[in-house]
Image: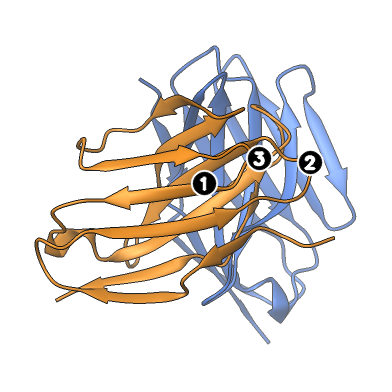
Chain colours: A blue, B orange
Amino acid sequence: GENVEQHPSTLSVQEGDSAVIKCTYSDSASNYFPWYKQELGKRPQLIIDIRSNVGEKKDQRIAVTLNKTAKHFSLHITETQPEDSAVYFCAAIRGNQFYFGTGTSLTVIP
Amino acid sequence: EAGVTQSPTHLIKTRGQQVTLRCSPISGHTSVYWYQQALGLGLQFLLWYDEGEERNRGNFPPRFSGRQFPNYSSELNVNALELEDSALYLCASSLGARQPQHFGDGTRLSIL
C-alpha cells in the first residue's frame, strides 16, 4: 500500500520568513496531492492541491511543487503570518486509496 | 452553500457500547469519506462511500461499518467500543474520487 511520510513534524519560523513542508510517497500511481490546514479545534481545510500532470501550482503566498520522479511534493508558504500557525497535512490519492501524512505543526513567531 | 455537517458534536460512551455518527455532505456531492483522528495524530482513512456503495475501507476492524443513504448522507457505526476508539471522527465529502474533499467539524468520541 501507499506510505506517505511528512517532514518536519514541527516547524517554527519568524513572521515574514518562508516555511517548507515536504512529503514523500511510495506509490507511483498516486496522482492527486492535496494539502490541508487544520487550526486548533477546527476542521481541516483544503488550501491547495496539485495533480500529477503539473509540476508546480501557486496561490498567492502558498505554492506546491511535485517531483514525480523522486516521488515527493512540498508546500511552500512565503511571508508567513501568525495566522498561518496550524497543523498542515499532505495527502496522496490514487483512485480509491487515500493516504494522509502525519502532519506538521507550524508556529509563526510574531 | 451549507458545508458538511456532522452530528452529534460530542459523545461519551463506555466500553462495549455501540455508537452511530451522522454526516450530511455538501449539496451535489456524492462521495462521503470517514476518517479517524486520534489526539495528536494524523488522519486515518476509515471508509469511502459513493453513490450509495462502499468503495473502499481502511485498515480498521469489521466493527467499524457504515452506509450511505439515497440522499447521500452517511452513518458510521462502531460496535463493541474500545478505549482506543476515543478520537475525533471526521466526515468529508467531494464530487467524486480525486476531487477536493471538504471536511465537517467532526464528532468527538470519548470512551470511558
Q: Residue at x 35, y 33 (%)?
A: B58
Where is residue B90 drawn, in percent x and y? 48, 57
Q: Quadrant of the N terminus of chain A?
A: top left
CB under 8 Å between callouts 3 and 1? no
**Please, what is the three-letter code of the amino acid marked with disc 2?**
Gly
Res B74 label? 1
CB under 8 Å between callouts 3 and 2? no
Q: What is the crowding at mark 2: few (fewer than 14 residues within 10 Å), some, or many (at least 20)?
A: few
Q: Quadrant of the C terminus of chain A?
A: bottom right
Label 1 in the same subunit as label 2: yes
Choose between A70 and B13: the one closer to the eye. Answer: B13
Left or right: A24 in relation to B50: left
Mark 3 element type: strand
Choose between B69 and A26: the one closer to the eye. Answer: B69
Q: Residue at x 27, y 43 (%)?
A: B64
Where is residue A53 drawn, in percent x and y? 77, 16
Label 3 in the same subunit as label 1: no
Label 3 in the same subunit as label 2: no
Q: CA distance from mark 3 to mark 1?
A: 23 Å
Which residue sits furthest left? B16
Up-down relation of residue B26 to residue A30 (above or below): below
Q: What is the crowding at mark 3: few (fewer than 14 residues within 10 Å), some, or many (at least 20)?
A: many
Choose between B108 and B6: the one closer to the eye. Answer: B6
Where is residue B100 drawn, in percent x and y? 71, 40
Res A34 label? 3
Which residue sits furthest bottom? A110
CB under 8 Å between callouts 1 and 2? no
Mark 2 element type: loop
Q: CA distance from mark 1 to mark 2?
A: 14 Å
